[in-house]
Amino acid sequence: MPTRVFLDGEVVPAGKARVSVFDRGFLYGDSVYEVLRTFGGAPFALGEHLDRLDHSGAGLRLPLPPRVAIEAAVRVTLAAAGNAESYVRVMVTRGSGPIGLDPALGDRPVLIVIVRELELPDARLYRDGAEVALVSVWRNHPRALDPAIKSGNYLNNILALAEARGRGAYEALLRDAEGFITEGSSSSLFVVTAGTLQTPPLGAGILDGITRRHVIRLARSRGLVAEERPLRPADLTGADEAFICSSLRSVLPVTRVDGVPLGAGRPGPVTLALAAAYLDHARVAAG
Ligand code: PDD
C-alpha cells in the first residue's frame, strides 16, 4: 500500500522523499510534529493536532507555515496515497544551514507530511491487554525540555521504551523526579478505581494528549467521574483497571504492570466501554 510524502511543495513516493544531512531536524531534532489517523478515510481531530503543532512551534520559537498550507498538504497527500485508512505525520523542521546550535542558522521552515497505510497494534493486545513497565528513566522536566512540546527530539521516550522492551513490556511509563507517574513513551495513562477514572494532570509535565481529552469528555458525558490528579505507582498497581491511549492506538487496555497482573488481569468493563465509545465517537467526528 502506498506511502506518499509531501516535501517542498510536491507529493513524492517514499523512495524520493529526501532531506539534506544539514537539516536541523536531522542534526538536532530541531523540529515539531504531530501524528494522527483517519477514520473512514478522513483525518480525525486535525484542527486540535494543528493547534498543538502551533503550541509546539511557539515553544521552540519555530515559525510554522500558514495553517491553510498545512491543511492543504495533508489533503493532497492523503488523496495521493489513497489508502482505506491512513497514518498521517505532519512535521516542520527549522530547515538547513551551517552546522551550529544558533536557531538563526536554519534557512526556512520545511513542511513534511508522511502518509502511509494505518497499522494498528496487534489485535491480541486489545483482547488480552498490554503490559507496561515503570521504567527508571525520568520524564524530562518541563523546565528542561517541556513534554508539552511535541518536538522531533524523542530520546527521553526512546530510552524509556528501550528499557521497557528489554523487560518484555509493551509500553514504558515514565515518572518524574518526585516519583509521580507522568505518561507513556507515546501514550497517556488512565486508571480506573471504584468506577472513577484518574489520569495525571497536565501540570505533571506531560503532552496534552488529544485522545486523553476526548476520553475525559466521553467519560463525563456517560456520567462517569474523570479526575485529573497526581498518580503514584501504588495508584496504578492498586487500580481495578488501567489503559493507555493515543491517536494511533485509541484506547488500549493495560493488564500487567512489571509482570504482575493488574486488577482481574484482563481488560475491565469501564475500559472496554470507553474503548468502544471512543471508536464510535471518532468515526462520527472524522466523517
Ligand atoms: N504520540 N504522550 C506522548 C509522549 C506521546 O508521544 C503521545 C502521542 C501521547 C498521546 O497523545 P495523542 O492522544 O495526542 O496522540 C502522549 C504519537 C501518537 C506518536 O508520537 O506517534
Image (spheres, rainbow, N blue to C red):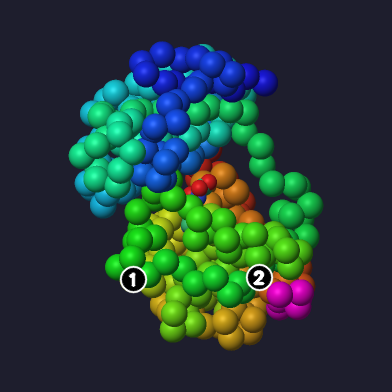
Instruction: Give the residues in magenta.
Output: 258-263
Q: What residue did someone put label 1 on?
A: 203
User: Residue 23: x and y, percent?
Assistant: 38, 33
Work out whether 107 lies above or below 50.
above
Give percent across and percent down for residue 279. 57, 45
Quarter of the figure with the N terminus: top right
**Left/right of residue 94 with respect to residue 188 in the rendered view:** left
In 3D space, how far apart are the residues under numbered discs 2 and 1 (Cα atoms)?
22 Å
10 Å crowding of disc 2: few (<14), some (14-19), many (20+) = many
Earlier sequence position, callout 2 versus callout 1:
2
Q: Nearer the viewer, residue 189 or 9?
A: 9
- Which amino acid, mark 1? Gly
Q: Nearest the camera: 196 or 235? A: 235
**Could you say which is closer to the camera, residue 239 or residue 220?**
239
Dominant SS type (magenta): loop
Residue 8: image quadrant is: top left
Q: Give residue 128's position: percent from left, percent from top.
A: 78, 60
Query: What residue is shown with label 2?
Result: 133
Please give left or right for residue 183 compared with residue 73 in the image. Answer: right
Magenta-span inclusion, residue 76: no
Camera sees residue 270: no
Are the residues flagged by discs 2 and 1 in contact, CB closer than 8 Å? no
Q: Residue at x 69, y 74 (%)?
A: 257
Helix, strand or loop status at disc 2: strand
Q: Residue at x 57, y 50 (%)?
A: 250
